[in-house]
Amino acid sequence: MRARLNLTLPVELISRINELADRKKLPRSAIVEAAVTSFLSPDHSDAREAAFTRRLDRLTRQVQRMERDLGVTAETLALFVRFWLSVTPPLPLDAQAAAQAKGRERFNGFVETLGKRLQKGQSFLREIPDDMPPSTVDDQPG
């Protein structure tokens, strides 16, 4: 048995239903019936939950990657500063101006090289394997 139901829908939605009906060569009522049945079926909520779960899993992996990259970046910077401070002697006052000029020149070269790598999509962090085995020897300098 079938019962009649009159309803109002936004014009845009009716246009989409009409287009689909023409394309699939189906009556509009069949399309609306299938949509309502799908919406009311218990599988609908399961499918939505599965979609949310997949999105959350993807976001979790992205956050874990960001945490890993941040940890690698912080450790890299800390090791560099520690090494630099332990091997760089203080300069006499008369050599500081020349050293600062050379430092600016070297920094500009560093920024240029970094910019080229980033434009090419190269990343130091991507060169580090995700599954590094734990080290048994302290590899830190100093």
Image (cartoon, rainbow, N blue to C red):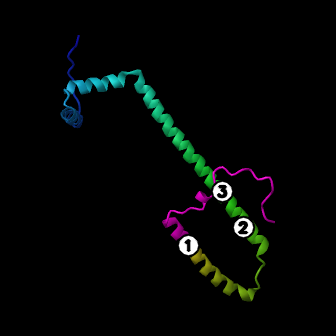
Q: How far is the residue under mark 2 from the one under mark 1?
A: 20 Å
Residue 72, numbered circle: 3
Span shown in magenta? 114-142
Q: Amino acid at mark 3?
A: Val
| Residue indicated by mark 2 | 81
Q: Quick one: quadrant of the N terminus?
A: top left
Image height of 52 relative to 74, above or below: above
Residue 136 within the magenta-colored segment of the rendering: yes
69 relative position to 53: left or right: right
Res 89 quadrant in image: bottom right
What SS does tag 3 mark? helix
Residue identified by numbered label 1: 113
Identify which residue, 94 or 114, lies in the foreground: 114
- Looking at the image, is 134 positioned above or below residue 41? below
Q: Judge left or right: residue 122 versus residue 23.
A: right
Q: Where does residue 131 sit, x and y in percent of width and height?
A: 66, 49
Between 133 and 28, the residue placed more toward the observer is 133
Q: Is residue 34 shown above or below 114?
A: above
Labelled disc at residue 48? none
Q: How far separated are the C-alphas under marks 3 and 2?
A: 14 Å
